[in-house]
Amino acid sequence: MESNPKSTQWLYGVNPVAEALRSGREIKALHIHLGRRKGVEALKAEATSRGIPLKTEDAGFFEGRFPKGHQGVAAEVALRGYVSLEELLLIPGKKGQRPFFVLLDQVEDPRNLGAVLRTAEAAGVHGVVIQKRRSAGLGPEASKASAGASEHIAVCAVSNIKNAMHRMREMGITIVGAEAGAAPAWEADLGGPVALVIGSEGRGLRRIVKEKCDLIVSLPMRGKVNSLNTSVAAGVLIYEVLRQSP
């Protein structure tokens, strides 16, 4: 695991905190709004069984720290480290499955990152690769948007996404980029080892990244809007790969 200079971060919302507890992440304390009664019994029981301090807080504690959607539940947790690229690439073999990865090319909105992680985890993607710079990282907003799925999927942060693509290609993984104007995804053969590359909000794939892809696919736009949200497009493509899986 790669380290981070900070030692803790906040998670907020019932699902992110519940999944952090389920995953066994180190938790410094569980904070619950004094008026919150329903939906937190299991959280309290798990925290108590693990010896995690339970703290009852007033509204000011939450409103001063978290955006709307905190649901009166928060936890201070040890930072979750990123896995190295080599650790990531070992995961399919350990599971006896064909490799299936998602690479995000400078996706900057943590809500989009979280939504992609949620879909990727649900579909059985083995891991997600992000860039260290000019990209959203694992944090409270991404965790909240992932509904806690970020606790259960491997995420790798690399300095250069092109190097990760090259390493995957060496392993026989087909690198599939998503870009408007290409052939529809369902006309491509996505049944083998695949790494989907999804571009950033507004800009799409960078030219230098697109040129490193083995195949470019798209989602046809038949309405008046000419693009999809990054996480929505990623979700459709992830499940197209899953549909073609043997």
Image (cartoon, rainbow, N blue to C red):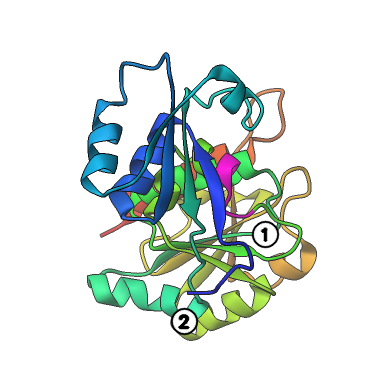
Q: Which residues are magenta?
A: 137-142
User: In screen coordinates, is 110 left or right of 192?
Assistant: right
The residue closer to the viewer here, 95 or 75, is 75
The residue closer to the viewer here, 63 or 173, is 63
Residue 132 position in % (x across, y down): 68, 66
Quarter residue 15 falls in:
top left
Q: Please give the name of the residue rendered at 58% of the width and 76% of the height, measured from the top-left corner.
A: 164
Amino acid type for the residue under numbered disc 2: Glu
* Whether residue 134 is situated above or below residue 145 in the rendered picture: below
Residue neighbourhood size for the residue with mark 1, other residues' Cα within 10 Å, grouped as few (<14), some (14–19), many (≥20): many
Cα distance in 3D space between marks 2 and 1: 19 Å
Amino acid type for the residue under numbered disc 1: Asp
* Whether residue 83 is situated above or below residue 239 in the rendered picture: below
Q: Residue furthest bottom?
A: 170
For the C terminus, the quadrant is bottom left
* Whether residue 110 is situated above or below residue 57 in the rendered picture: below
Residue 127 position in % (x across, y down): 44, 62
Residue 134 position in % (x across, y down): 76, 58
Residue neighbourhood size for the residue with mark 2, other residues' Cα within 10 Å, grouped as few (<14), some (14–19), many (≥20): few
Label at residue 150: none
Which is more foreground, mark 2 or mark 1?
2
User: In screen coordinates, is 70 left or right of 216?
Assistant: left
User: In screen coordinates, is 201 left or right of 25?
Assistant: right
Does the image show residue 122? Answer: no
Q: Earlier in the sequence, mark 2 or mark 1?
A: 2
Q: Please give the name of the residue rendered at 29% of the width and 77% of the height, measured from the top-left corner.
A: 93
Label at residue 105: 1
Q: Which residue is mark 2?
A: 86
